[in-house]
Image (cartoon, grey):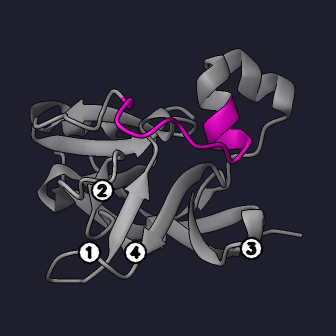
Amino acid sequence: MTSKRVRVKVFDHEGQLVGPIEAARVAKSDAEWRAQLTPKQFEVARGKGTEQPFCGTLLDNKREGVYSCVCCNLPLFSSDAKFNSNTGWPSFFQPVAEENVVEHADRSYGMVRTEILCARCDAHLGHVFDDGPRPTGRRHCVNSESLVFTDRERVATLADSPA
């Protein structure tokens, strides 16, 4: 059984990343998730699906800001770490905070990959690979359907966001 609490970093009311803090894990029934998410968001974030390459709404987003979990609003990635990987999905060389993204072995479809999940609600984000740019050499390949974007000047609105 998973813990009902997690340690994550969040934004405060001044728009600064703080923590790690102890926060409640977000757990909902499939019916509750379906009521909150679009069918495609549910398929990807809760059903571990993958959107078609080069079709995601956030792939070509060049604005400055933060990418958060579509399910629970936990901040996951910053535009400062986004890069064009030419793979067809938004890619980041590191999360906004290591605590906020969990890695799991994924042996589906006859492959061995590392799945990445939201630390607060276990939403499927995508996969991480060791072929990214400096400084980390990692590529967090993320589905747009798993993310919501907040412009930099509005990041303080993520503080204490209801999940």
> In the picture provided, is 86 more to the left or to the right than 98?
left
Question: Element type at marker 3?
Answer: loop
* Crowd class of label 3 (few under 14; some 14 to 19; many from 20; radius 10 Å): few
Q: Amino acid at mark 4?
A: Glu
First in sequence: mark 3 or mark 4? 4
The residue to which callout 2 is attached is 91
Residue 20 image-quadrant placement:
bottom left
First in sequence: mark 4 or mark 2? 2
Question: Element type at marker 2?
Answer: strand
Of residues 125 and 9, which is closer to you in this image?
Answer: 125
> In the picture provided, is 120 more to the left or to the right than 61?
right
First in sequence: mark 1 or mark 2? 2
Where does the magenta region start and end?
Answer: 43-56
Q: Amino acid at mark 1?
A: Gly
Dominant SS in magenta: loop
* Residue 57 falls within the magenta-colored stretch: no
Q: Amino acid at mark 3?
A: Arg
Tell me how far mark 3 sits from mark 4, CA to CA. Answer: 23 Å
> In the picture provided, is 3 more to the left or to the right than 87?
right
Tell me how far mark 1 sits from mark 4, CA to CA. Answer: 16 Å
Image x and y of residue 1, in percent: 90, 70
Are the residues flagged by discs 3 and 2 in contact, CB closer than 8 Å? no
The residue to which callout 3 is attached is 107
> In the picture provided, is 127 more to the left or to the right than 158?
right
Tell me how far mark 3 sits from mark 2, CA to CA. Answer: 21 Å
